[in-house]
Image (spheres, rainbow, N blue to C red):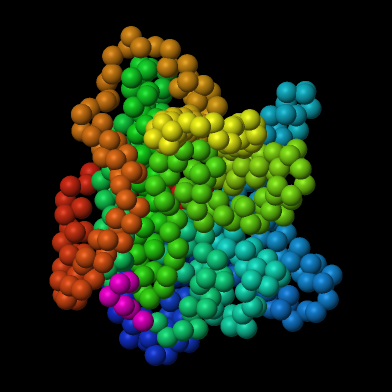
Amino acid sequence: MLFPTFEFGLFFLIVFAVSWELRRELSLRKLFLVAASYFFYGWWDWRFLALLALSSFINFSAGWLVGRTQTPLSQKLTVGVAVTLNLCILGFFKYYGFFLESLDDALTALGLARDLPFLHVILPVGVSFFTFQGISYVVDVYRGHVKASHSILNVFLYISFFPQLVAGPIVRAAHFLPQLDETPRLTRAMVGMGTVLILTGLIKKMVIANYLATQLVDPIFFDPSVRGAGDLLIGVYGYAVQIYCDFSGYSDIAIGIAALLGYRFTANFNQPYRSASLQDFWRRWHISLSSWLRDYLYIPLGGSRKGSFATYRNLFLTMFLGGLWHGAAWTFVVWGTLHGTMLGIERYLTRRLNAFAPKDDGTPGIIKRLSGSTMHLVGIIWTFHFVCLAWIFFRAESIGLAWDYLKGFGDWTTPNELVTPFLVALIAIAMLFQFTPSRLGRWLAEGIKEFPSPMLGAILGLGIFFIWAIAPNGVAPFIYFQF
């Protein structure tokens, strides 16, 4: 079930009305939201409801056992078993075919071809997201960041809550579980923020991302070898904007829907293309995933505590595995490798430059500020273009097509066929909003929160109707559904 559809609109109206009618009966409300979430997930394929329930039960049981067990060894064993089971579920559904195909290619190249047990495995929507949430819950219970929940209903709702179930953001148990034991309240601030987030998310997805995908990005990436450098350049800019608007749009809608149901989620994007360094980019892009990788992978590997070499190794491994998390394909491996390598290079160069920088050379303050502004601008341009370079591998269907894309930048004689003023304007407008005040959305929400409830409902309804009217025909799935 996709957010920008009539079916979801009807589904949400029913969920909204019933959940608030049950607001004084917490157990019944949570039971209803679990049922609604399973209905939402089963709309795609009911056969995977058992997998979602199994994942939830494994993590509830592991958290309960860790909470009851006193000895550190038994706690570690329980966490280890739970994490292994979670990764086995993720690994089978997401990577079974990829690793078997890679093994078959390697054996064939060595002249050792064998009949391997190939199976057609369907990738469950959102398996990466609810698996990571389950792992974070068990590990956080072990670390003492959250108490083990004695309510199986709470854990089932935490893992399956429909706004963020299939494409995030990855919600932390320490942030969400306490909210489930509080009587929900729908404040004017939450209604205002929910309205703004849902409308901005729909504009990002249905208008900007969908137009760029159908009229520019998809045709160019289908066969980049027949395109000129101009089309290819605007095409990769278009994809950078498309994937941002598509994914941040989903996150905005998910956070807005949760707010209308009385729950608070943290932001998942913070104007990432204004970053002046790759490190800053990963503080702003898919924040819930980057912070998850930091807390549950980079830091356990040793972080930056064991010397320079270990730090660079840990950065590389974190991004390499982060790339593999996105999909079972060599293109994602290259994407993660590029980011991991450049993060290490950037860290090394920054440390070296800081070591040689003069502490106070007597330069007037205004010149220092101008120099700092120039370097900041250079950093923004460099970071954006490196991210765009990596996006080519992320989007391409194969390494060969990605290489064709890069080779095409040498051909400036082929005329542009797909670049239009309308598409360039969409890209420019989307990029402009990367540099507006970061609190713009909150200001808009503050501005409408005192409106009467019927007026807020009219704003949301008319806004959705207007967006549907100007959006291209059809509803494309969100990009991150495949991860």
The quadrant of the image that shows the N terminus is bottom left
Task: Please state the horizontal and vertical placement of residue 359, each as a whole percent of the image.
Answer: 58, 36
Q: Can you say whether 67 is above or below 365 in the image?
A: below
Count of all numbered marks drawn on residues in the image: 0
Task: Please state the horizontal and vertical placement of residue 440, each as a whole percent of the image.
Answer: 29, 55
The reply to whether residue 166 is in sight is no
Which residue corresponds to the image point at 80% horizontal and 67% vertical from the top-left? 77
Which residue corresponds to the image point at 27% horizontal and 20% vertical from the top-left? 417
Task: Please state the horizontal and vertical placement of residue 39, each as a whole percent of the image.
Answer: 43, 70
Q: Residue 316 is drawn in which quadrant?
A: top right
Task: Please state the horizontal and vertical placement of residue 445, each as a whole percent of the image.
Answer: 27, 64
**Considering depth in this image, is 114 or 466 the residue closer to the camera?**
466
Which residue corresponds to the image point at 78% horizontal and 79% vertical from the top-left? 69
Q: Can you say whether 378 is above or below 317 in the image?
A: above
**Considering depth in this image, is 210 or 251 the residue closer to the camera?**
251
**Considering depth in this image, is 148 or 396 the residue closer to the camera?**
148
The reply to whether residue 422 is in sight is yes
Which residue corresponds to the image point at 59% horizontal and 60% vertical from the top-left? 131
Q: Can you say whether 141 is above or below 286 in the image?
A: below
What is the residue that sits farthest to the front in this orientation? 362
268 left or right, relative to 50: left
Q: Which residues are magenta?
A: 185-190
